[in-house]
Image (tube, helix red, strand yellow):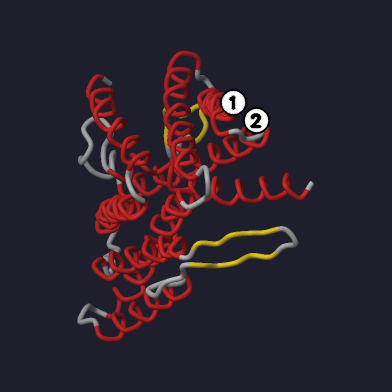
């Protein structure tokens, strides 16, 4: 626990400073690096169960996805009354998410046809490569899209990070002290329903604290926080399923006391897209009303 706290004490201020002061391009690039490190660990887990991915191509596909998400912000959109929107300062080099996916897919097809691996390995390689893109790279890339939401993007990223951190801490202490009902014993024997409920409560409290600072309706932010927290807990459990299936305790050893990068961002992977889509939907609904 002391090692875990020490690592967090070093990393949290760095992450907060990068989110608050770093330019969007730097944030997107660093998020891409984090995703690739998580994929490296994910594929190491896959290797242990005989699933050998097309790793380098998947890393390249991940970079394309993050660039695509970032490039959406290269054109500035301004909305006016009457439902009129004007796009200005549009520049070349914009890559759509559709194009990024198609490039990745056709590259996988080419690798599947040209590989010297035994044919028996082609389908597993395609499967785990696609799984890495769909279950890690794509959802985590929405952290870049959250950052592009004006004028509260940076605040929303900090909100997402804090609700995950606060939820994890309260869930740990409540689960350890009063937790009795096992939540998913086959996946994570130490997780309890009491801890899961405390996790959700902590995220709601974070929303209340952030609502005034962000000047957002409190109930709206609580709804986003609770949904993102539940998605984050699902992300934590599915990563436990990966590890249990491969009989490993941690995805890696990159972060002392925390395990690997995938262990650290497993909740954030699914929380980020939930925050992105629900903020726009709920805020849009309130403006319409």
Pick out the residue farthest to the top: 177
Q: Indicate the position of residue 88 as horizontal and vertical percent values.
A: 51, 67
Q: Indicate the position of residue 172 as horizontal and vertical percent values.
A: 42, 23
Give the CA distance from mark 2 to mark 1.
Answer: 6 Å
Q: In this figure, what is the number of numbered marks?
A: 2
**Element marked by disc 1:** helix
> Residue 282, relative to residue 57: is it above or below?
above
Q: Residue at x 62, y 35 (%)?
A: 216
Pick out the residue farthest to the right: 289
Badge 1, how many Cα within 10 Å: few under 14, some, many 20+?
A: some
Contact, mark 2 vs mark 1 (Cβ under 8 Å): yes
**Element marked by disc 2:** helix
In the picture of the structure, the residue carrying the numbered disc 2 is: 218
Quadrant position of the N terminus in the picture: top left
Q: Residue at x 53, y 25 (%)?
A: 202
> Residue 93, relative to residue 49: is it above or below?
below
> Residue 86, relative to residue 227: is it above or below?
below
Q: Residue at x 66, y 34 (%)?
A: 217
Between discs 2 and 1, the one toward the N terminus: 1
Q: Residue at x 23, y 43 (%)?
A: 252
Q: Indicate the position of residue 66 as horizontal and vertical percent values.
A: 37, 61
In the picture of the structure, the residue carrying the numbered disc 1 is: 208
Q: Indicate the position of residue 132 as horizontal and vertical percent values.
A: 37, 60
Q: Nearer the viewer, residue 43 or 283?
A: 283
């Amino acid at each position: 626990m002391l090692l875990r706290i020490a690592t967090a004490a070093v990393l949290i201020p760095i992450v907060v400073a990068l989110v608050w002061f770093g330019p969007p391009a730097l944030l997107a690039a660093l998020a891409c690096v984090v995703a690739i490190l998580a994929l490296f660990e994910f594929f190491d887990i896959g290797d242990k169960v005989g699933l050998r991915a097309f790793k380098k191509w998947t890393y390249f596909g991940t970079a394309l996805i993050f660039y695509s998400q970032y490039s959406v912000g290269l054109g500035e959109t301004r909305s006016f009354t009457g439902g009129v929107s004007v796009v200005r300062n549009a520049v070349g080099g914009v890559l759509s998410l559709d194009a990024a996916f198609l490039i990745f897919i056709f590259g996988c097809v080419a690798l599947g046809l040209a590989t010297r691996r035994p044919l028996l390995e082609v389908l597993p390689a395609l499967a785990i490569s696609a799984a890495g893109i769909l279950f890690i790279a794509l959802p985590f890339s929405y952290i870049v899209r959250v950052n592009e939401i004006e004028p509260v993007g940076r605040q929303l990223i900090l909100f997402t990070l804090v609700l995950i951190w606060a939820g994890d801490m309260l869930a740990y202490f409540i689960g350890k002290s009063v937790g009795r009902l096992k939540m998913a014993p086959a996946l994570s024997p130490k997780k309890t329903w009491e801890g899961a409920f405390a996790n959700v409560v902590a995220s709601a409290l974070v929303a209340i604290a952030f609502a005034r600072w962000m000047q957002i309706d409190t109930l709206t932010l609580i709804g986003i926080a609770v949904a993102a927290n539940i998605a984050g807990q699902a992300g934590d459990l599915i990563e436990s399923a990966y590890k249990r299936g491969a009989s490993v305790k941690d995805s890696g050893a990159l972060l002392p006391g925390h395990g690997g990068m995938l262990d650290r961002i497993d909740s954030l992977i699914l929380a980020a897209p939930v925050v992105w889509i629900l903020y726009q939907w709920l805020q849009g609904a309130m403006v319409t009303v």
